[in-house]
Amino acid sequence: MSGLLALLDDVAGIAKVAAASVDDIAGQAAKAGAKAAGAVIDDAAVTPKYLTGFEPARELPIVWRIARGSLINKLVFLLPAGLALSAFAPWLIAPLLMLGGAYLCFEGAEKVAHALGFGAHHGGPDGSHLNRDPAHLEEEKIKGAIKTDFILSAEIMTIALAAIPASTFWLEAATLATVAVGITLAVYGAVALIVKADDLGLWMAAKGRLGLTRALGRGIVTAMPGFMKLLMVVGTAAMLWVGGSIIVHGLAEMGWHGPEEAIKHYAVAVADLGADSWRAALEWTGKAAIDGLLGLALGIVLIPIGTRLIAPLWARVFARG
């Protein structure tokens, strides 16, 4: 009996350790996922464009195939690569993170330039889907979406890896896997809701038994174009903010603390202008605004490099694959 009680006590101890590990994984995954907000919002904003021109019945299957490709990107390719970096070359994480931040700045600045009528944005549909075989077009669009997702997923996983405190190999692996699965479900679940919102609104407007239901359906249909524009604006602002903050923080880690300290000083000065109850919010807003402006400035500098040099090389590499 004493042996059985000792065994049960050991089992209870193991269960407590396992529960604590689960809490650690969940907490670290939530923090790491929050750090990747810019790339996540951009992923949700960009993906619906790949569904333009398809029959409504094909939208959810296409979303599922892109989501499956995204999971493969994260779990099969990027997670092992991230763990290898953490184990054997942790000094590479900060430069890679800054590279991802620079890409976010480039994407955000390019969208701003496109909105103002300068240049051409490479991420949207160009009308070439007209008069083409739907099955071939579907395969082409899915492959293009998964390739774009690979870049965004690389940013997400690198940001998440940098946000995870030093821990055991298996805890890091479990945290990254949780981030990968959780963000993919959140992004593509949101995409599925977005692309089917019009159909739901039309069904409610036509089939609703109550006047309120029909009015709500018409409201959804009317609001969706504006919602998509708002999502793109929020996504662009988040990319510039996160990209700029990554660059500034990376410079501080590399020994150049001047920009980070200056931004903090100006953010505190902005907070001093408001009431004490709004101080924290004003300081955060001031810092995010400055980070975003720096991200926009860097992105504008990177636009000619990205569009004239990197994008053609990238297209050639994938064309060969």
Image (spheres, rainbow, N blue to C red):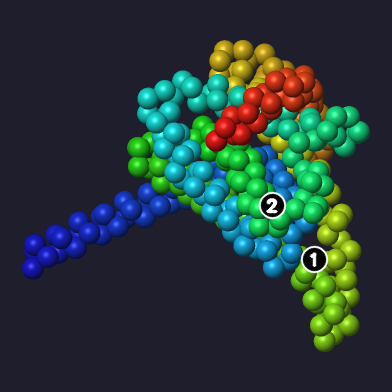
The residue shown at (70%, 43%) is 42
Residue 53 x %, y %: 78, 56
Q: Position of residue 112 (x, y in %)?
A: 83, 34
Left or right of residue 160: residue 17: left
Residue with the mark numbered 2: 137
Q: Residue at x 78, y 69 (%)?
A: 199
Residue drawn where x is 85% and y is 80% of the image: 206
Q: Residues within 10 Å of mark 1 (few under 14, many from 20)?
A: many
Q: Quadrant of residue 198?
A: bottom right
Residue 229 seen: yes
Between marks 2 and 1 in the image, the one whose residue lies nearer the viewer? 2
Residue closest to the eye, 9 or 243: 243
Is 35 situated left or right of 52 in this image?
left
Q: Residue at x 54, y 41 (%)?
A: 32
Q: Quadrant of the N terminus?
A: bottom left
Mark 2 neighbour density, 10 Å: few (under 14) some (14–19) many (20 or more): some
x, y (%) of residue 321?
55, 35
Q: Is residue 297 above or below residue 74?
A: above
Residue topped by disc 1: 198
